[in-house]
Image (cartoon, rainbow, N blue to C red):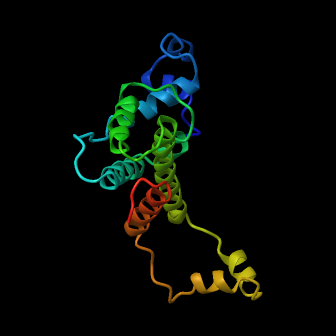
């Protein structure tokens, strides 16, 4: 995203940077349009299934979209003007929260939290794909000051099933928000 600027976009489309300002007021508006464009990728079918199933489905779609567009997590948490696609997402998510007992503000906060969790998982996956200098970490672990972390990072540790971890995190959040009851 650091390379996405009005000047860079203008160069890509063969226009002068100043000419783009006839269409865009700012870089923030450009970012908002980018978020709006990818928000159109949600499949917002009619609500079916339990509230938890519907909300998990929306969160999972969000994570998939962020995987397809690695630049998305950095923008998704920002404040952007809402366009038709982002409004459609909210319009689809809110009925799943009917009967939850949450007020309107808490319902919107719940949808924002699901998006934030998808962003966190997408960013974590991106970080794991980057080469890391683990020498400093292992030097600290060898001090014996972090026995629990050492055990968690031991070579014998089972690899994390990212899909299951994401679904568990979403369902645990929904339980805590009293949207689903077990």
Q: Position of residue 158 (x, y in %)?
A: 45, 83
Q: Position of residue 140 (x, y in %)?
A: 75, 80
Q: Quadrant of the N terminus?
A: top right
Q: Would you identify the image quadrant in which residue 174 lies?
A: bottom left
Q: Nearer the viewer, residue 68 or 178?
A: 178
Q: Nearer the viewer, residue 158 or 1?
A: 158
178 sits left or right of 92 in the view: right
Q: Is residue 71 visible?
A: no
Give the residue at x 53% y 23%. Answer: 29
Give the residue at x 48% y 46%. Answer: 110
Give the residue at x 42% y 53%. Answer: 179
**Total tally of numbered discs in the picture:** 0
Say if 101 sits above or below 175 in the image.
Answer: above
Q: Position of residue 162 (x, y in %)?
A: 42, 67
Say if 181 sits above or below 31 in the image.
Answer: below
Q: Nearer the viewer, residue 173 or 20?
A: 173
143 sits left or right of 122 in the view: right
Q: Is residue 95 visible?
A: yes
Q: Quadrant of the C terminus?
A: bottom left
Q: Nearer the viewer, residue 21 or 52?
A: 52
85 sits left or right of 128 in the view: left
Q: Position of residue 35 (x, y in %)?
A: 45, 34
């Amino acid at each position: 995203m650091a390379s996405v600027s009005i000047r860079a976009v203008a160069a890509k489309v063969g226009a002068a940077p100043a000419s783009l300002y006839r269409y865009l007021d700012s870089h923030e508006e450009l970012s908002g349009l980018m978020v709006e464009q990818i928000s159109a990728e949600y499949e917002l079918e009619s609500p079916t299934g339990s509230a938890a199933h519907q909300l998990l489905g929306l969160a999972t779609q969000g994570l998939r979209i962020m995987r397809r567009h690695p630049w998305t997590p950095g923008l998704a948490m920002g404040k952007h003007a809402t366009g038709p696609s982002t409004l459609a997402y909210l319009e689809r998510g809110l009925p799943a929260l009917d009967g939850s007992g949450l007020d309107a503000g808490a319902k919107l906060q719940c949808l924002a939290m699901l998006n934030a969790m998808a962003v966190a998982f997408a960013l974590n996956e991106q970080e794991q794909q980057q080469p890391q200098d683990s020498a400093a970490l292992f030097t600290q672990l060898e001090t014996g000051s972090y026995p629990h972390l050492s055990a968690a990072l031991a070579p014998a540790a089972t690899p994390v099933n990212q899909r299951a971890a994401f679904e568990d995190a979403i369902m645990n959040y929904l339980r805590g928000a009293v949207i689903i009851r077990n």
